[in-house]
Amino acid sequence: MSAHHEIPPGRGSVRMLLDRGVHPATRLPLLPGTSCEDCIHRLAPTAPRGRHHRCAQAVSRRRGPNLPPGMPGCRRWTAGA
């Protein structure tokens, strides 16, 4: 993971993927200089008091991991959010 991405320490599997340069939601390579915060694929929280953003491109059948502020973008990153 490149040094310019400052995200809080993640739980085991998320941190391991990021350390290998792989996005935890899409399983694609990270795209340097981007953030999920600025991507059109970032989904707003759905719960009434929700604060966790997700990715519309997640490979999981479930909702995928939380996308905290500063989460680096992947190769599918598209400007717009």
Image: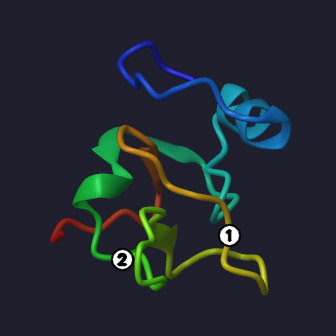
Toward which corner of the image does residue 76 lie, by quadrant? bottom left
Mark 1–mark 2 contact, CB under 8 Å?
A: no
Residue 13 x/y as whole percent: 83, 41
Toward which corner of the image does residue 10 lie, by quadrant? top right
Q: Classify 10 Å Cα crowding around label 2: few (below 14), some (14-19), many (20 and above).
A: few
33 with respect to 11 (left or right): left
Residue highlighted by disc 2: 44
- Most foreground residue, 36 or 52: 52
Residue 67 x/y as whole percent: 49, 55
Residue 29 in the image: above or below residue 15: below
**Residue that appears at 47% across and 58% down:** 75
Residue highlighted by disc 1: 64
Per the model, the C-alpha gap separating discs 1 and 2 is 13 Å
**Residue that appears at 64% across and 35% down:** 21
> Which of the numbered marks, if any, corresponds to residue 50?
none
Looking at the image, is mark 1 or mark 2 earlier in the sequence?
2
11 with respect to 49 (left or right): right
**Residue that appears at 15% across and 71% down:** 80
In the rendered structure, which amino acid carries the disc numbered 2? Ala
Helix or strand or loop: what does disc 1 sit on?
Answer: loop
Residue 32 x/y as whole percent: 38, 35
Q: Which residue in the rendered view is the most extreme toward the right? A: 12
